[in-house]
Image (cartoon, rainbow, N blue to C red):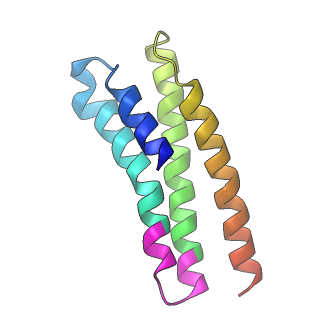
Amino acid sequence: MELVKEVYKLTTQLPTHERFGLTSQLQRAAVSIPSNIAEGSKRSSRTDFRQFCLISLGSAAEVETQLLIINQLYPAISTKVALQEISEIQKMLTVLASKLHKTL
C-alpha cells in the first residue's frame, strides 16, 4: 500500500501528456500488487494464493520497468524511494510464493 501512495505521488510529477501513458499504466500496475495479494489470500487453496502472489510479482516487475523508464525519460523525477520499495516487495513475494509452494 505504501508503494501505491508513492507511485501516485510520483506520477503527479509526470507531464500531462503522460496521463494516458506512463501515469495510467504505472498506477494500475502498482494497485494490482496489493489487490492480487488480497484476492489470493481469500481464495480457498494455497495453490490459488500462490498463483495470485505470482501475478503480483509480475505486476511488481512491470512497476519496476516503468520506474526505470521514467528514470530514462525524466531524470529530474526521483524514483529512488519507489524503486527501493518495489525491490523489497519483490523479495517478500518471492519468499511467500516459495513457502506456499513448499507447503503444497
**Residue at the spot x=53%, y=36% of the render?**
65
Residue 76: within the magenta? Answer: no
Q: Is residue 51 left or right of residue 93?
A: left
Number of numbered markers: 0
Picture coordinates of residue 49, whole percent (x, y): 55, 77
Q: Where 60 sits versus 16, above or below?
A: below
Picture coordinates of residue 45, whole percent (x, y): 55, 88
Q: Nearer the viewer, residue 30 or 51?
A: 30
Extent of the magenta region? 38-49
Q: Where 32 sits versus 67, above or below?
A: below
Classify the position of the C terminus by image quarter: bottom right
**Residue at the spot x=60%, y=84% of the render?**
46
Q: Is residue 41 left or right of residue 17?
A: right
Quarter-of-image position of residue 24: top left
Q: Main secondary structure of the magenta part?
A: helix
Q: Where 40 sits versus 25, above or below?
A: below
**Residue at the spot x=23%, y=29% of the render?**
19
Q: Nearer the viewer, residue 83 or 71?
A: 83
Residue with the most extreme top position: 76
Picture coordinates of residue 17, whole percent (x, y): 22, 20
Q: Where 33 sits versus 23, above or below?
A: below
Q: Is residue 76 left or right of residue 95?
A: left
**Residue at the spot x=57%, y=56% of the render?**
57
Residue 39: within the magenta? Answer: yes
Q: Is residue 85 left or right of residue 103?
A: left
Residue with the most extreme right position: 102
Picture coordinates of residue 84, whole percent (x, y): 63, 35
